[in-house]
Amino acid sequence: MAPALTTAYKYGNPDRPLNVVILSDGMTEQKERRELLTLINQRPSNARVFCIGIGNEINRPLLEQLAQDSGGLAAFISGGDDFQRQAKAFRRKLMRPAASQLELHVDGINVYDVVPATLPNLYFGAPVRIYGRYAGSGEASVTLSGQVLGREIENTVTLPFPKEDTANPEIERMWAQKQIDQLLKASDRENNRQDVLDKVVRLGEDFSIVTEYTSFLVLENDAEYKRWKIERRNLGRIERDRAAQLKRRQTLNALRNKAMQDIGPQSVAMNRPANQQKPSAPLPSVTPNASSPASQPTVTPQAPRQQSRDFNFGSGPVGPIFVGLAMLIKRRKRNIKARTKS
């Protein structure tokens, strides 16, 4: 891929952005990996690299790193995916402007070990996930700033940072995994992993994460763990995570069942306010007697409104059924007169 990437850089123009798309369906040797990372750092200032991996035998971490270091995106397609749908989704990301030069500031609490250290560009339909640690507790102001088509954007929200939160214990392991990935990628850019090996091993052991330098040890029974004095920290972590997941699932099921109960005509009638349960009859109109001011006012009740419209033929309101009967009786009288004359 190095010759193709070098050739693509020749199309760079300072007056417009250059988007380079890399298609890969295989693995990359370690020697070429270092060369590609060097070429990414030597790209034109307005160039972005987008990587698309096809199949299951690809170097996914490398493609993600190439795209992230250049401000681009990485997408992966397997044999079971809908190619046309994936292509349209990727095209939508390229057609819409991206938010670049993102920065995150937190005021009111001490935040550290944020991953990623440099935020990537924000594209349509591709969220940016940020992990970090904090010391203390309370509410803090979080501000996200950046640029869209050269215009400054900024959004500030106030978020709670609890002293202890047991609802989502999996987040700490997710942070540790991202921290390991960031350490290894940073060392690969400099072609030297020796300085980060101790940190990677410590994170893998503390948070029970399999890496290139740490692994799980599985023994036959508890006696073997006691014999070799091995603490089963991962077992307790898994039980804690599963308990939190079960609690969230039960909460979601309760919300879903409640939402289903509130759907339908019966729920509408039950949730109607008490003053709207039944239509109340109109109040009678009060007309005072003008000839005798001291006398009691006369009350004239109003007829209740009907849903159907009445027909009025001069003498009073007549229903449509009565009109039909009257016409039928009149026609029979005419027939009787005709027979008498004959």
Image (spheres, rainbow, N blue to C red):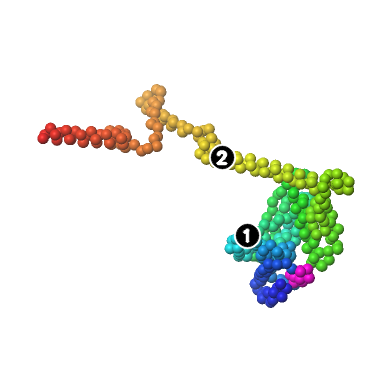
In percent of width and height, residue 157 lies at 69, 51
Residue holding disc 2: 262
Q: Secondary structure at mark 1?
A: loop
Residue 38 visible to the viewer:
no
Give the mark, 2 or 1, whose residue is nearer the N terminus. Answer: 1
Which residue is the extreme one toward the front? 220
| 10 Å crowding of disc 1: few (<14), some (14-19), many (20+) | few
Answer with left or right where residue 309 lies relative to residue 238.
left
Asked if 257 appears above or below 188 in the picture, the reply is above
Answer with left or right where residue 271 lies relative to residue 145.
left
At x 42%, y 29%, the residue is 284
Nearer-the-camera pick, 245 or 183: 245
The circle drawn on residue 141 is none
Kind of residue sitting beneath label 1? Gly
At x 86%, y 63%, the residue is 194
Secondary structure predominantly adopted by residues drawn in magenta:
helix
Quarter of image, res 307: top left
In percent of width and height, residue 331 lies at 21, 36
Kind of residue sitting beneath label 2? Asp
* Count of all numbered marks drawn on residues in the image: 2
In percent of width and height, residue 125 lies at 63, 58
In percent of width and height, residue 41 lies at 75, 70
Q: How far apart are the alpha carbons under marks 2 and 1?
A: 38 Å
Nearer-the-camera pick, 132 or 15: 132
Looking at the figure, which quarter contains the C terminus? top left
Which residue is the extreme one toward the top? 295
Magenta extent: 29-40
| 10 Å crowding of disc 2: few (<14), some (14-19), many (20+) | few
Residue 332 visible to the viewer:
yes
The circle drawn on residue 80 is 1
Q: Secondary structure at mark 2?
A: loop
Quarter of image, res 36: bottom right
